Amino acid sequence: MMMSRYGAKVMVTAGPRLFSSSAVSPNHLLNSRVPAREFSKMTFEKKKTEDNQSEKGSSGGKGDQGNKGEQLVVSYWGVKPMKITKDDGTEWKWSCFRPWETYKADLTIDLKKHHVPSTLPDKLAYWTVKSLRWPTDLFFQRRYGCRAMMLETVAAVPGMVGGMLVHCKSLRRFEQSGGWIKALLEEAENERMHLMTFMEVAKPNWYERALVIAVQGVFFNTYFLGYIISPKFAHRMVGYLEEEAIHSYTEFLKELDNGNIENVPAPAIAIDYWRLPADATLRDVVMVVRADEAHHRDVNHYASDIHYQGRELKEAPAPIGYH
């Protein structure tokens, strides 16, 4: 398209001023356009990996694996960074979770509780989970580190899907959720932290990463449709999935105790997240993760029971912070 004669004149006279670096600097725009407001310019600096590895936090282990490399983020939007310290005064190095989100796992929980399937949906949920165990055993065999990593990529999906759908339902009906949105998203985040921990123990290879992508794509959409059709079935299936997770981690512990798997020091992220002692090992990590799975088992069976009684989740207070 040809430029008009008038437009050409404007570009000739004003172009150099418009497109010069000095004319469009942020300071110039802020001073001329918004004289009454002062924007603060902040720079967030992340320490170099070498510095993080040389410094020892509460764990005395690896450096901050979540803050690799030196990065600069410059902004004038006024979002100020939080300077967080631990109880001992040292700097908190994790950006993926905060000190007030950490906890000590309840290791006294009953690991043997089991919901006996009696109705057709329960039996369908039970045998669906059992059928999924066979290909998992065949693929991973006794590589429990990789098995745990794969398990957590699946286990973190239901809480997110359930929380999202309960959230949307709350919006559509203009009603509160009884805290179940937070409880389900809390479960999803906890499962994701399991994955972040085992990523430090077992490094996935390329075909395991490809498998995760395929399984997550299929499972997310299947569980999404299943939850829309029958939430009580969806929660029951997750309850049985968590029972299988307890079994898998129990087998993991047996391999550690028998010396078939090296009981390496616990990752730094696990020590801070579960408030483990500085000399904690992989066995301690598996113990607290197994306890988490038992709590998720209880929550999902409980949610399914609520639906079976003809009630909605909002009618029963959600077990927020149930660890």
Image (spheres, rainbow, N blue to C red):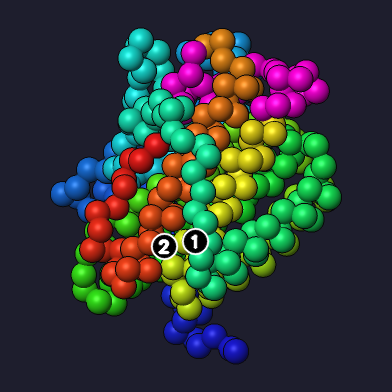
The quarter of the picture where residue 253 lies is top right
- Is 42 positioned to the left or the right of 120 in the image? left
Closer to the camera in the image, 21 or 36: 36
Q: Observer-nearest residue: 319 or 163?
A: 319
- Residue 48 seen in the figure: no
* Mark sitting on residue 224: none
Q: Earlier in the sequence, mark 1 or mark 2?
A: 1
Query: Residue at left 82%, top 42%?
Result: 141
Q: Is residue 314 left or right of residue 162?
A: left
In magenta stretch: residue 265? yes
Residue 277 pos. (x, y %): 49, 13
Q: Identity of the amino acid at label 2?
A: Ser
For disc 1, the marked residue is 236
Residue 303 visible = yes
Q: Are marks 1 and 2 in contact (CB under 8 Å)?
A: yes
Q: Amino acid at mark 1?
A: Arg
> Which region of the structure is painted magenta?
253-277
Residue occupied by mark 2: 304
| 55 or 6: nearer the viewer | 55
Secondary structure under the numbered disc 2 in the rendered image: helix
